[in-house]
Image (tube, rainbow, N blue to C red):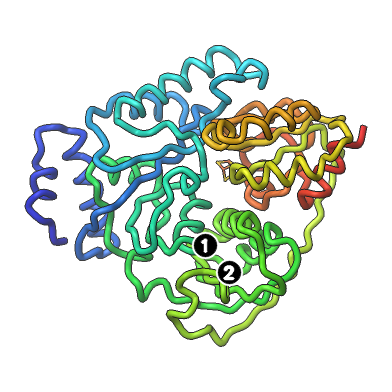
Amino acid sequence: MYLDKEEEKMLESENETVSKAMELLVTLGKMFKAERLVKIKSAHISGISYDNIGDPGLEWIESLNARVSVPTTVNPAGMDLKKWKEMGIDERFYEKQIRILKALKNLGADLTLTCTPYYINRPSFGDHLAWAESSAVVYANSILGARTNREAGITSIAAAITGRTLYFGLHIKENRMPTVTVKAKGNLAAVGYIAGKELRGEIPYFIFEKKPSEWELKQLAASLAATGSVAMFHAEEITPEFRDFDVPKEIVEVEGKLEKECNADLIAIGCPHASKEELEEILKLIGDEKIKRELWIFTSRRIAEESIDLVRKLEKMGAKVYCDTCMVVSPASDRFKCVMVNSGKALHYIPERRKCEVAFSDLKNCIRIAKTP
Ligand code: F3S
């Protein structure tokens, strides 16, 4: 694999963290037959909840001795940094999580603690990135036209330090060609959940019955990534590269219809983290009827701070707005019997990662249930 002078210098660096980071990229580069590396505009690190990585991950991150060389954001942690006690997180977990965050801060990462880094540091069309949150990868590739493969937590850290990632896969234009046409209608979180299972690893070209909102596309991205390891899609008349390729001849039809019921004692919204527009929509759906069950809304601290009036109104109606974390990566969900979500990604991962049952419905019905005693 070709390395330029700067890259060779990193490979031979006396700083072991830098040389190991470059060595990892070179080893993977040979494995994936990448010709070279590509400079990235930003990195996004995932898998930083203590719940996910435990003591081995914590000790590894603490052992790193370098600084990131590009703007680097970070995925949700295992708790809200301010309301962790209210969430039911114990002191031991809190302390371990804080150690992980301190180590990431020492690396120079921006502790955004969100899976929606694109609301904070929005990439431009054509930017090369090394992002490791699967839902954000689909969003960046599809909706923004930026270029990233699905990085792992560890490779995103190597990329953040070196400022490079492998030039292969979705960094190369011809690999972004759609492979199957999907005519879709109904709930897009459900469309992504169902289509992902059928179309593992494909690049769908969607034709929607009606124009979706931005957050519906975000839900679609997250579901496709979760059930199908999909890393990008095109959508007719919507996504920036849809005209760049021929429309695939193979057509499948997907109806986003999915209801999974249980008697929810927690309704959890905000997977991926809610935008300001979603917070507005939730408040509108609550109306003037108070919340009667636990309703947790997850968003980034940045969005919550920018939408402080909205957050106060939601809390006044009985909802709890949590930042820095989510229903999947936090052990806080474990004390509930059944968690109801409107997200295909949460529907997929809660049974795997948490101790509770999961139910699925659209946002409107989730809020209706939250208002029912
Ligand atoms: Fe984000 Fe957690 Fe969902 S990290 S995409 S809210 S599983």
Residue at position x 38%, y 72% in the image: 175
Q: Residue 202, can we see it?
A: no
Q: Label 1 neighbourhood size at 10 Å, few (<14), some (14-19), many (20+)?
A: many
Residue at position x 63%, y 36% in the image: 298
Residue contact at pointers 2 and 1, CB within 8 angstroms: yes
Tell me the quarter of the image containing the C terminus. top right
Q: Secondary structure at mark 2?
A: loop
Q: Is residue 19 above or below residue 290?
A: below
Q: Which residue is mark 1?
A: 230
Is residue 351 found left or right of 132 in the rendered image?
right
Is residue 332 found left or right of 46 in the rendered image?
right
How many numbered dots are placed on residues in this image?
Answer: 2
Question: Which quarter holds ligand 1?
Answer: top right
Give percent across and percent down for residue 364.
81, 49
Q: Secondary structure at mark 1?
A: loop
Q: Is residue 159 above or below residue 171?
A: above
N-terminal of the pair, mark 2 or mark 1, is 2
Q: Check mark 1 vs ligand 1: CB closer than 8 Å? yes or no.
A: no
Q: Is residue 130 above or below residue 238?
A: above
Q: Which residue is mark 2?
A: 199
Is residue 212 found left or right of 236 in the rendered image?
right
